[in-house]
Each structure stands twice: as structure tokens, then as C-alpha cells.
Image (cartoon, grey):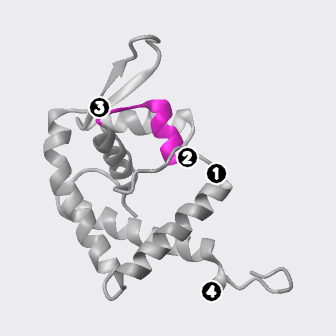
Amino acid sequence: MHASTSHYLLKDSLGHLATQFSKAALKRINQDLQEGGHAITSEQWTALVHIWNQGGLTQQELGERLLKDKTNIARLAAGLEQAGYIHREAGQVDRREKTLRLTEHGKQAMPGIAAVVQRVLADAYAGIDEHELALCRRVLARARQNLCPAPPVNPGSPI
């Protein structure tokens, strides 16, 4: 939207387009994960991939990466722990600080889950030039950084 425009056109809104893409992709990822016998959600997948890529994260670090508060991260971690994908370890210095790590089950499941997500994203990106995708990633990353400076998000994250 330009400052001189009196109408807000959703078709021109980067935020709206990004949200609509995200909703469509997450819906499809959730469907394909369930159909593939993976009892997790796209939200849980996103948390798992951050933990997987870093070899473990504190709940606070995961919250910063996912832009979620302590309560939501605790709920998300509890669900993943109950499903057997992660375990929580007490911190070395502060026993209240919990580090999240993949269990053996989680480590074994990740390649299959990642393949499901990669197939969905390949469908989403069909017919889009790699240069355009790279530009889109840079623009969205910069826009996010402008609004919410945070530690860099691992480029291996889905969506």
C-alpha cells in the first residue's frame, strides 16, 4: 500500500499474500503428515526442525525463533515430549531452564517427515524460477527483521 492510496488492496499486501500462502501450505502439510502416518502438526514440525538443526535448543531459544511466549512453547514441548519426539533436560547452570533434544524416535522420524514437507513445498514452488524464490525469501526475511529483530532463523526451516 502506498501512502497516497486511500484504499487498502489485499492483492497488493505482502503480509496478506504471505499469510494466505502460509495458511495454504500449513493446511496441506498437516493433511499430508496425517495421511503419511505422522502424528504431528506443521507447528510441531517447525519446532522439531529448529531443534534438529541446532542439535538442541532451550525452550527460550525456541520461543524466540518461533515468536511464541513461554506458555505456548511449554505446551508445544509437552506435546512433542508426550509423542516421544523430544525430551527435556534441565540446564547445567539453571535447573529451571529446559533444553529440548530429539529422542532416538525423533531422530529416526525426521527424514520421513522432512520428505513429506519437501514434497508439499515442491508442489507449491512448481513453475517458480529459483531466482524468484531466492528473492522472495530475502524480501520476507528482511521485512520480518524490520518488524521483529531476532536471532537469524535457520534457512532450513519450512515455509
Residue drawn at (24%, 50%) of the image? 39
In the picture of the structure, the residue carrying the numbered disc 2 is 67
In the picture of the structure, the residue carrying the numbered disc 3 is 101
Is residue 126 left or right of 7 when viewed as pictured?
left
**Mark 3 or mark 1, earlier in chain:** 3
**Mark 1 or mark 4, earlier in chain:** 4
Tell me where the magenta segment starts and ends, as one range. Answer: 55-67
| Residue situated in front as seen by the camera: 124 or 40 | 124
Give the label, 1 or 4, closer to the camera.
1
In the picture of the structure, the residue carrying the numbered disc 4 is 11
Asked if the residue at tag 2 contacts the one at tag 3, i.e. Cβ–Cβ closer than 8 Å, the answer is no
Number of numbered markers? 4
In the picture of the structure, the residue carrying the numbered disc 1 is 148
- Asked if residue 102 is positioned above or below residue 129 in the image, the reply reads above
Helix, strand or loop at disc 1?
A: loop
**Percent of width and height locating residue 114:** 23, 57
**Mark 3 or mark 2, earlier in chain:** 2
**Among the 4 quarters of the image, the one containing residue 142:** bottom right
**Disc 1 versus disc 4: distance between alpha carbons?**
24 Å
**Disc 3 versus disc 1: distance between alpha carbons?**
26 Å
Residue drawn at (38%, 12%) of the image? 92
Asked if the residue at tag 4 contacts the one at tag 1, i.e. Cβ–Cβ closer than 8 Å, the answer is no
